[in-house]
């Protein structure tokens, strides 16, 4: 059942009146830009400890600590900055966010190759999180400029760019430094992002929109414009849960593989395949589940994916070989792939277009919170209660999330599935 919208709201939640005639072209430019920026941000993973050591950190313990600080600082800064950039997009335009993010990241990523010590490296990684956000900006633009009936498919297609970038980036980072050197790898990555900047400037076109006053964009005014905030709050919590569930297992994959395959000479290789299987499953399933959300309702896809993920986590605690874990992580990646585009679709359908950027910025921050807390919780539970307990605890959280979303979707009048 839909809910009436008062006259002071400029557009009804999920309306198509601001859909862009260029939405399909915008989608594909955002897809390529998201791929290039995410790949460039993640290619540092394989050689980050080597680069930290090259910058003057010598003990193994210090290298590990500084590598973790340098890697996590980007996500911390991005989580803090996302709501601000979302509100900026609502006020000044969504294309401008992409132009700013691509140019800023092109400069910062290139400058990483000029770092002279580990402090500069951490500072530049922090700056990358603050000025970045091309992928999250793309979600805002695509969600608000795509016709409602195609938003699930469009957001699912866009997510393949992010997933593919996160999959290909570490592979590139494992090859290029040996061919052209570590510092040159950063320069090349910055050049690729600069090409994304040029394409964004040249090809993305945004529908002109009314600028709102600062009073209209205040936090209190923003939430007062949402006819029914309960679905939005549910999706913010679900976004946190999504990244929490995915990242809670990642820190212990290598240790877990060594436990189920003691004496194997290929622990690192198998662990890498296990991690990649999740992203690969997501790449295959994201557009299809997004299209399914357009047909049966995005909230139904969210509930189904949470419950399926909960079930798939249980047998992961009892695997005895690497290929079993690879298969289960692949299937889990397919289930998780339906969550992010569907979460965004539910939010888009339940908030006015004028504040969509602000709310989606909050959604991005919630996801980063899950990305930070997930590894901490997984490491703590695994260290104190064993590896299997991590799978059981994460499964319970996903089950709770699925049941909670089901209850809310059925009991709250006006909540749009």
Image (cartoon, rainbow, N blue to C red):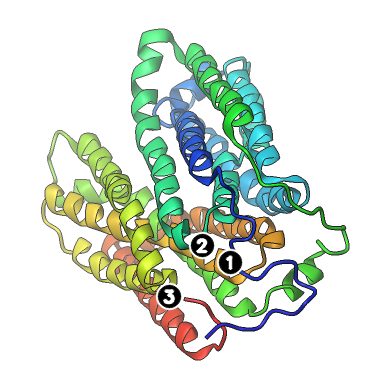
Residue 92 drawn above or below residue 169: below
Task: Specify the quadrant of the image occupied by residue 352.
Answer: bottom right
Q: Secondary structure at mark 1?
A: loop
In the image, which disc is placed on residue 317? Answer: none
Task: Specify the quadrant of the image occupied by residue 246.
Answer: bottom left
What residue would you read off at disc 2? 148
Nearer the N terminus, badge 1 or badge 2?
1
Q: Residues within 10 Å of mark 1 (few under 14, many from 20)?
A: many
Residue at point 46% right, 62% down?
149
Mark in the foreground, 3 or 1: 1
Residue 145 drawn above or below residue 384: above
Nearer the N terminus, badge 3 or badge 1?
1
Q: Position of residue 44 (x, y in %)?
A: 46, 28
Q: Residues within 10 Å of mark 3 (few under 14, many from 20)?
A: many
Decide: marks 1, 2 in contact (CB < 8 A)?
yes
Residue at point 40% right, 65% down?
294
CA gap, disc 1 to disc 2?
A: 6 Å
Q: Position of residue 94 (x, y in %)?
A: 67, 45
Number of callouts: 3
Residue 217 drawn above or below residue 43: below
CA gap, disc 3 to disc 1?
A: 24 Å
Nearer the N terminus, badge 3 or badge 2?
2
The answer to whether 317 appears left or right of 237 in the picture is: left
Q: Secondary structure at mark 2?
A: helix
Residue at point 13% right, 54% down?
324
In the image, which disc is placed on residue 401? Answer: 3
Residue situated in front as seen by the camera: 325 or 96: 96
Decide: marks 3, 2 in contact (CB < 8 A)?
no
What residue would you read off at disc 1? 14
Mark in the foreground, 3 or 2: 2
The answer to whether 103 appears left or right of 55 in the picture is: right
């Amino acid at each position: 059942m839909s809910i009436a919208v008062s006259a002071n709201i400029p557009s009804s939640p999920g309306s198509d009146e601001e859909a862009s005639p260029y939405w399909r072209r915008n989608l594909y430019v955002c897809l390529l830009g998201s791929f290039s920026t995410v790949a460039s941000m993640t290619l540092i993973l394989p050689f980050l400890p080597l680069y930290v050591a090259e910058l003057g950190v010598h003990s193994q313990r210090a290298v590990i600590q500084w590598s973790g600080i340098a890697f996590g600082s980007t996500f911390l800064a991005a989580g803090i900055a996302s709501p601000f950039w979302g509100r900026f997009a609502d006020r000044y335009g969504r294309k401008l966010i992409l132009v700013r993010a691509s140019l800023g990241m092109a400069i910062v990523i290139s400058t990483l190759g000029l770092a002279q010590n580990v402090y500069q490296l951490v500072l530049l990684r922090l700056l990358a999180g603050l000025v970045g956000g091309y992928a999250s900006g793309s979600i805002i633009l695509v969600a608000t400029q795509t016709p409602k009936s195609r938003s699930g498919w469009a957001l699912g297609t866009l997510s393949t760019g992010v997933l593919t970038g996160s999959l290909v980036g570490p592979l590139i980072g494992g090859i290029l430094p040996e061919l052209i050197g570590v510092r040159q790898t950063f320069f090349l990555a910055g050049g690729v992002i600069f090409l994304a900047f040029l394409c964004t400037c040249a090809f993305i076109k945004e529908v002109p929109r009314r600028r709102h006053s600062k009073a209209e964009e205040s936090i209190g005014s923003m939430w007062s414009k949402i006819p029914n905030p309960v679905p939005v709050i549910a999706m913010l919590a679900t976004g946190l849960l999504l990244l929490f569930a995915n990242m809670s297992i990642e820190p212990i994959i290598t240790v877990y593989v060594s436990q189920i395959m003691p004496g194997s000479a290929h622990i690192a290789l198998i662990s890498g395949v296990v991690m990649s299987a999740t992203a690969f499953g997501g790449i295959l399933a994201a557009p299809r589940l997004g299209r399914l959300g357009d047909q049966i309702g995005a909230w139904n896809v969210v509930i189904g994916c949470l419950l399926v993920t909960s079930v798939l986590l249980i047998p992961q605690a009892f695997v005895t070989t690497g290929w079993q874990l690879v298969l289960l992580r692949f299937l889990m990646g397919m289930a998780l792939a339906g969550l992010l585009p569907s979460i965004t679709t539910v939010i888009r359908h339940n908030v006015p277009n004028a504040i969509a950027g602000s709310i989606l910025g909050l959604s991005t921050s919630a996801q980063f919170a899950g990305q930070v807390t997930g590894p901490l919780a997984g490491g703590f539970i695994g260290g104190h209660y064993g590896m299997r307990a991590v799978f059981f605890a994460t499964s319970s959280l996903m089950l709770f999330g699925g049941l909670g979303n089901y209850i809310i979707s059925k009991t709250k009048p006006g909540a749009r599935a």
